[in-house]
Image: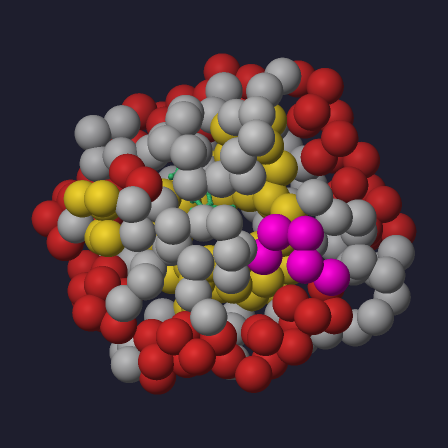
């Protein structure tokens, strides 16, 4: 099995970000959703990006932000990817970032919507680089700590890589990987000591748990 990639999402300080990178995270999420406890201004995000080792990817998390605006932030900060919520397949406006649309899934019909999104985006010449599947919690866009429906996701193949998110922790991520076989895993609250504050020990244990998956 190819190694499962790891994104630690919602880092809020240069020290938390650097530690996650040094612990072995492949990617770090920078959250630009103002209602999140992990929210960053572009200025705060720039300080984090500047301080990172050179080979760690950075992903901007945007909720309801027009793609053009999200891309402007991504361009300004040199981000690798844009993770977006509640949007339509991008139009033919080209941009040099990996696009990762995020879907909050409660049942199988929502997985059909994911497949349709990928087909429509591909037809428009803009297939996403991956899709992120999170749990559905009414009134919350993400970072909820609720586990996604792994049983629905086993064998789910939308035609692009699947990033599994939602309620992952150092304790359950190996079971999640065994059940879903995702291309990557993504965690925010499960490696924190309080909302927006990463716990270095939990981050290190999360990375080790994923690296130990076979
Ligand atoms: O983390 C947030 O606050 C957040 C807010 C709005 C949209 C997305 C957000 N985070 C994403 O949600 C997943 C799951 O979070 P958790 O691990 O269940 O706490 C996280 O990986 C981020 O990609």
**Closer to the camera, 128 or 68?**
68
Looking at the figure, which quarter contains the C terminus? top left
Q: Is residue 11 magenta?
A: no
In the figure, residue 70 lies in which quadrant? bottom right
100 lies above or below 144: below
**Colour setup of the view:** secondary structure
Q: What is the span of residues highlighted in magenta in the rendered image? A: 62-66
Question: Is residue 128 in sight in this rendering?
Answer: yes
Residue that protrudes farthest toward the left in the picture = 201
Main SS of the magenta part reads loop
Residue 25 x %, y %: 30, 58
Left or right: residue 6 versus residue 110 is: left
In the figure, residue 131 lies in which quadrant? top right
Which residue is at a point 57% across and 30% down the rendered structure image? 139
Residue 127 x %, y %: 75, 54
Left or right: residue 9 versus residue 94 is: left
111 lies above or below 37: above
**Closer to the camera, 162 or 213?**
162
Question: Is residue 212 in sight in this rendering?
Answer: no
Q: Is residue 65 magenta?
A: yes
Which residue is at a point 80% across and 35% down the rendered structure image? 116
Which residue is at a point 33% across and 59% down the rendered structure image? 11
Residue 120 x %, y %: 85, 45
Residue that protrudes farthest toward the front in the picture = 35
Which residue is at a point 24% across and 53% down the rendered structure image? 197
Left or right: residue 200 versus residue 185 is: left
Looking at the figure, which quarter contains the N terminus? top left
Residue 69 x %, y %: 69, 70
In the figure, residue 119 lies in which quadrant? top right
Quarter of the rendered structure image containing ligand 1? top left
């Amino acid at each position: 099995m190819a190694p499962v990639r790891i994104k630690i999402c919602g880092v809020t300080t240069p020290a938390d970000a650097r530690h996650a990178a040094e612990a072995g995270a492949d990617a770090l999420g920078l959250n630009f959703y103002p209602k999140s406890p992990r929210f960053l201004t572009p200025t705060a995000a720039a300080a984090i990006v500047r301080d990172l080792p050179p080979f760690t990817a950075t992903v901007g998390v945007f909720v309801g932000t027009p793609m053009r605006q999200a891309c402007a932030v991504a361009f300004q900060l040199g981000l690798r990817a844009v993770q977006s919520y509640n949007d339509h397949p991008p139009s033919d406006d080209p941009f040099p970032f990996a696009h990762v649309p995020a879907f909050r899934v409660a049942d199988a019909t929502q997985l059909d919507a994911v497949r349709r999104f990928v087909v429509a985006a591909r037809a428009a010449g803009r297939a996403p680089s991956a899709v992120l599947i999170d749990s559905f919690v009414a009134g919350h866009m993400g970072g909820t700590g609720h586990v996604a429906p792994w049983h629905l996701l086993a064998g789910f193949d939308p035609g692009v890589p699947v990033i599994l998110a939602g309620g992952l922790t150092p304790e359950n991520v190996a079971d999640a990987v065994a059940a879903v076989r995702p291309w990557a895993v993504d965690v925010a609250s499960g490696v924190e000591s309080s909302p927006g504050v990463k716990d270095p020990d939990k981050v290190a244990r999360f990375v080790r748990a994923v690296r130990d998956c076979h």
